[in-house]
Image (tube, rainbow, N blue to C red):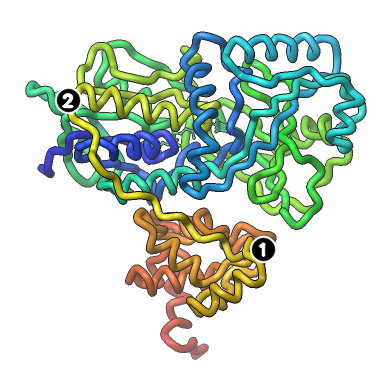
Amino acid sequence: MNTTFDVLVIGSGITGCATARALSRYETSVLVLDRGSDLAEGATKANSGIVHAGYDAVPGTKKALYNVRGANMYEALAGELGVPYRRCGALVLAFDDADRKTIEELKTRGETNGVTGLEILDRDSLLKLEPNLNPEVVAALWVPTSAIVSPYEMAFALADDAALNGVQFRFDEEVLSVTRDPDGCFTVRTDRETWRCRALVNCSGSSGADLHNQLSARKLTMIHRRGQYYLLDRAMKQPFDRTVFQCPSAMGKGVLVSPTVHGNLLLGPTAEDIDDPLDTATTASGLSDILKKAARTWAGLTTRTNITNFSGVRAHLTTDDFVVGPCEDCPGYFEAIGIESPGLSSAPAIGLDLAEMIAGYLTVSRKEAIVPYPVPPVPFHDMTEEQRAQAVSADPAYGNIICRCEVVTEAEIRRAIRRPVGARSVDGVKRRTRAGMGRCQGGFCLPRVAAIISEETGIPLKEVTKNGGKSYLLSDTVDVFLKGGHDHE
Ligand SMILES: Cc1cc2nc3c(=O)[nH]c(=O)nc-3n(C[C@H](O)[C@H](O)[C@H](O)COP(=O)(O)OP(=O)(O)OC[C@H]3O[C@@H](n4cnc5c(N)ncnc54)[C@H](O)[C@@H]3O)c2cc1C
């Protein structure tokens, strides 16, 4: 049996990371466990990256409450942690009278939720603002406070900050069972270890309901709802400055066309109910559905510069709201489950609330001092020539470009691995630095990134993975070449 932690958090997506960071401000010992090989391997790595303003959630729900509170925290948080964020605003398009009624309802709903600046724009003003919109549009809801963010970079920064302030993270460890013991503590059994904690927090995304149902008599049912995407190259001239939605439906916010914080263009997502929450495949029918719908927004749609397709899975509860807070029939057990959209937007507020509730339950006080988060360096890609020259003279590894598409240097890759919760796989480096995110999708830089990971961590090159588990990059056949030649006898 391992040490008893004050708090054990299951899941290191955006919700678990925000909760861990908020808990790190209190005099508590905190362990975060994740079955993935890195942070943010669930819904947090594959979503639209929109910080929703809060016009869509039904007033009075937890979704509405946390969405608006979380969105209001984002700009300052992203600034403090050096995470890419841009308040670009959003449009919700109307193409007929029924849509017009919907956007008016969304405006009223948003105002009830406390969203400011909402306006209905007519066709002419819209086309002036975004000339590439389908000219059949008749009106739109303008949402100036909507923003875009890099979701996984936010999770990485929150986790690094939490780790700097004492939180421990463990990966590749799946929680299989949770029980409340007679002494009020919890036993958490994973596929590798058994842990004990005084307070347990379930931020486990797609496993949320299963783990909840082990501890509570009030059973929850979860539906796994997949969303697929197209991602277009940032080298193309972007057709839109703002996020453009169509009217939402019961299945979600509909297909959007949106710039990303890194200057790519995102088309999607679909909304399909699936059995396996880990099934992040893309399908021909899903992708063709996106194109059909996105063409309604963007009349000149072209996917000539498409660089990848991906999908993420929403954790939708049949009760259709977030469950956040202490579980009524299991003291010491806290949860943030059913955190589908707008969960990314809501996470900072959910994390703060949960930490405060847990600190109250454990009767622990706030720390007198915290370790400040170091300001991250400007990416080499975004530096001026002068800044680049300075960087190279301070550290020659800045002069070695590893990823040519995204202009990522050796120095940045080494830093990504050395971060408090550093990268251990090629995808981990990719999400922290953008090496491999460009047009060639890692075709050029992947072997070089793998070699740097091996050098930095001591993991033998043959055991470096793309994204954990058995996703090895090298096979035994390749090993023959590594050893210095291949004979054809
Ligand atoms: C297609 C799509 C589009 C979206 N768009 C937006 C958007 O634009 N804006 C917005 O606000 N929200 C959006 N969302 C919602 C947002 O992505 C989620 O609300 C958010 O990422 C949920 O974060 P989380 O930490 O709760 O869950 P996750 O990110 O899923 O994290 C859960 C973690 O728990 C781990 N885990 C699971 N089971 C176990 C176990 N048994 N043991 C150990 N670890 C476990 C997983 O590996 C994972 O790392 C979207 C979601 C999807 C899928």
Residue 330: x, y in percent? 22, 16
Label 1, on which residue? 440
Q: Is residue 228 visible?
A: no
Which residue appears farthest toward the front when viewing the image? 368
Residue 328: x, y in percent? 27, 12
- Which picture quadrant has residue 183? top left
Residue 220: x, y in percent? 38, 16
**Residue in front for this viewpoint, 307 or 56:** 56
Q: Amino acid at mark 2?
A: Thr
Residue at left offset 50%, top offset 19%: 63
- What's the distance in space between the residues labelled 2 and 1, CA to CA? 53 Å
Query: Of helix, strand and loop, which one carries label 1?
Result: loop
Vertical placement of residue 455 versus 178, above or below: below
Q: Which mark is residue 363?
A: 2
Vertical placement of residue 1 versus 454, above or below: above
Residue at left offset 47%, top offset 45%: 80
